[in-house]
Image (tube, rainbow, N blue to C red):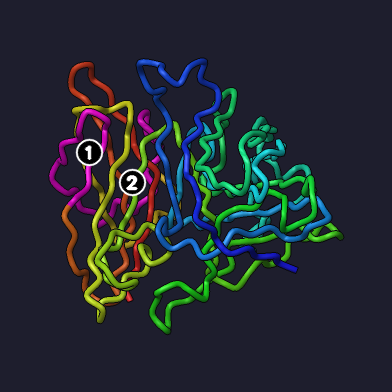
C-alpha cells in the first residue's frame, strides 16, 4: 500500500554533503543536474509502508537521459514528519531489467560503487522537507540508461507522526494529452523481491541525477497548470501542440563557463552510437542538423528561446560543449521530444 501524506507548510533548505565548509569559495564542478519532474507541482510526500524498510525506484526513461560517463550524485527532496530524529537512507544507481522498463532489483542490478548511506535530519522540531544534494565519494561510471534507488528506513516513531518520505507527483495530475502514453516510471521492491508499480502510471519522484558531463534538456513552456512556466517533467517530452506548448533547450555544463554549446538535432536515434574522443554521439547523423552556437554564462548555463513544434514531430538532440581558452570539448547526454 502506498502511504501518502499531504504536503505541509514546509521550510526548504539546501544541504550539500561532502564539503568541509558551507563557505567554500568555489562550487565543485561536475554536478550538472538532470531532472524529470515538475518542481512546482509535487502533490504529496510518500513512502510505501509505516512498519518496513522501503525500497523505491525512479526509472527515468532513455528519452530524457541517454548518456555516458559518470554520475556524481543525486539531488532529491525528502520530508521527515519529526525532524528531531536522525534517519539513515541509502541511495544507489540501478540498472534496467532488460527492456521491461522495470528496475533490476537483484544485487547485480546495483551499479558498482553507487550504494551509499547518508544520515539526515536529527535536529529541530516538527515536520520539515529539505532539498538534499547527496554526492558519491567518487563519481560512478553508469550505463547509458540508469535509474535511481532510494531505501528509506523503518520510521523511528509511528507513521505518519514520524518517518522519512520522498516528494512525488501522481501521474493522474500530469497535464499530458489524452492520447499520450503514460509509462510506469516509479516502482517499489515487493516482499518477494520483485519490482511492483508504485503509484499510477506517469508518476514521478522528486529525484534527479547529478552528472559529471554536461547535460542537455528539453523544456516545455506552457500554461498547462495555469500560469505560464517552463516544465522539465513528462510534459517536456510530449508537448501538446493544440495547447500551443512551446519547446526549448536548457544547457548545463559547469566546466564550460563562458564557453559555447552547439546542439545537434536529428529525427531518430542511431542504432549504433558514434564513439568519439569527446564522448558518444547518440542521434542519427544522417540528415542531422547543427544549430548555431549558443553562448554559455559564467556557470556554463544557457536557456534557448522556445517555439511551437509541428505536430507529430520527433527530435533527438545532443549538445557539444566547448571552450576556446583553454580548449576543451565534451558531448552532453542525449534526449528526445515527441510533439503531440
Residue located at (71% from left, 36% from top): 86
User: At x 34% / y 37%, what residue is drawn?
Assistant: 331
Residue 302 magenta-drawn? yes
Estimate the spatial distance between the alpha carbons at disc 2 and disc 1, rounded to whole Å. Answer: 9 Å
Quadrant for the C terminus in the image: bottom left
- Vertical placement of residue 98 versus 302, above or below: below
| Local crowd size for mark 2, using a 10 Å CA cut-off: few (<14), some (14–19), many (≥20) | many
**Whole-percent x, y for residue 98 in the image:** 66, 57
Q: Secondary structure at mark 2?
A: strand
Name the side, left or right, on which 12 lies relative to 58.
Answer: left
Mark 2 or 1 closer to N-term? 2
**Does residue 80 show up magenta in the picture?**
no
The residue positioned 48% from the left and 73% from the top of the image is 173
Position in image of residue 5 (x %, y %): 63, 63
Q: Secondary structure at mark 1?
A: strand
Question: Which one is nearer the viewer's eye here, 325 or 133?
Answer: 133
The residue that appears at 42% across and 83% down in the rendered structure is 179
Q: Nearer the viewer, residue 38 or 30?
A: 38
Examine the image and state in which quarter residue 281 appears: top left
Q: If the image is split into quadrants, where does the N terminus sit?
A: bottom right
| Residue 261 circle label | 1
Left or right, 52 with respect to 246, comes to: right
Q: Circles 2 and 1: CB distance less than 8 Å? A: yes
Question: What residue would you read off at disc 2?
Answer: 216
Measured along the vertical axis of the image, is residue 106 above or below residue 30? below
290 above or below 26? below
Residue farthest toward the left in the current orientation of the protein: 292
Q: Quadrant of residue 339?
A: bottom left
Whole-percent x, y for residue 272 in the image: 45, 49
The magenta segment is 275-304
Amino acid at each position: 500500500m502506498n502511504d501518502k501524506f499531504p504536503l505541509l507548510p514546509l521550510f526548504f533548505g539546501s544541504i550539500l554533503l561532502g564539503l568541509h565548509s558551507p563557505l567554500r569559495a568555489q562550487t565543485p564542478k561536475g554536478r550538472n543536474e538532470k531532472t524529470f519532474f515538475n518542481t512546482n507541482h509535487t502533490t504529496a510526500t510518500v513512502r510505501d509502508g509505516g512498519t518496513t524498510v522501503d525500497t523505491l525506484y525512479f526509472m527515468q526513461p532513455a528519452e530524457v537521459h541517454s548518456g555516458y560517463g559518470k554520475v556524481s550524485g543525486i539531488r532529491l527532496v525528502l520530508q521527515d514528519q519529526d525532524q528531531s530524529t536522525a534517519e539513515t537512507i541509502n541511495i544507489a544507481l540501478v540498472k534496467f531489467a532488460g527492456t521491461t522498463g522495470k528496475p533490476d532489483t537483484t544485487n547485480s542490478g546495483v551499479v558498482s560503487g553507487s550504494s551509499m548511506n547518508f544520515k539526515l535530519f536529527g535536529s529541530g522540531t516538527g515536520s520539515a522537507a529539505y532539498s538534499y544534494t547527496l554526492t558519491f565519494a567518487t563519481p560512478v561510471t553508469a550505463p547509458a540508461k540508469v535509474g535511481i534507488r532510494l531505501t528509506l528506513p523503518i520510521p523511528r516513531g509511528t507513521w505518519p507522526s514520524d518517518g522519512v518520505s520522498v516528494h512525488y507527483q501522481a501521474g493522474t495530475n500530469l497535464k499530458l494529452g489524452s492520447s499520450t502514453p503514460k509509462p510506469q516510471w516509479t516502482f517499489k521492491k515487493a516482499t518477494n523481491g520483485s519490482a511492483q508499480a508504485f503509484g499510477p502510471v506517469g508518476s514521478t519522484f522528486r529525484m534527479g541525477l547529478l552528472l559529471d558531463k554536461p547535460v542537455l534538456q528539453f523544456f516545455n513552456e506552457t500554461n498547462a497548470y495555469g500560469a505560464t512556466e517552463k516544465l522539465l517533467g513528462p510534459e517536456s517530452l510530449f508537448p501538446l501542440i493544440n495547447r500551443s506548448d512551446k519547446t526549448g533547450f536548457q544547457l548545463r555544463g559547469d566546466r564550460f563557463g563562458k564557453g559555447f554549446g552547439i546542439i545537434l538535432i536529428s529525427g531518430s536515434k542511431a542504432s549504433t552510437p558514434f564513439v568519439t574522443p569527446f564522448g558518444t554521439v547518440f542521434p542519427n547523423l544522417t540528415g542531422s542538423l547543427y544549430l548555431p552556437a549558443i553562448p554559455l554564462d559564467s556557470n556554463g548555463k544557457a536557456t534557448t528561446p522556445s517555439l511551437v513544434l509541428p505536430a507529430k514531430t520527433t527530435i533527438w538532440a545532443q549538445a557539444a560543449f566547448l571552450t576556446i581558452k583553454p580548449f576543451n570539448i565534451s558531448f552532453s547526454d542525449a534526449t528526445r521530444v515527441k510533439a503531440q
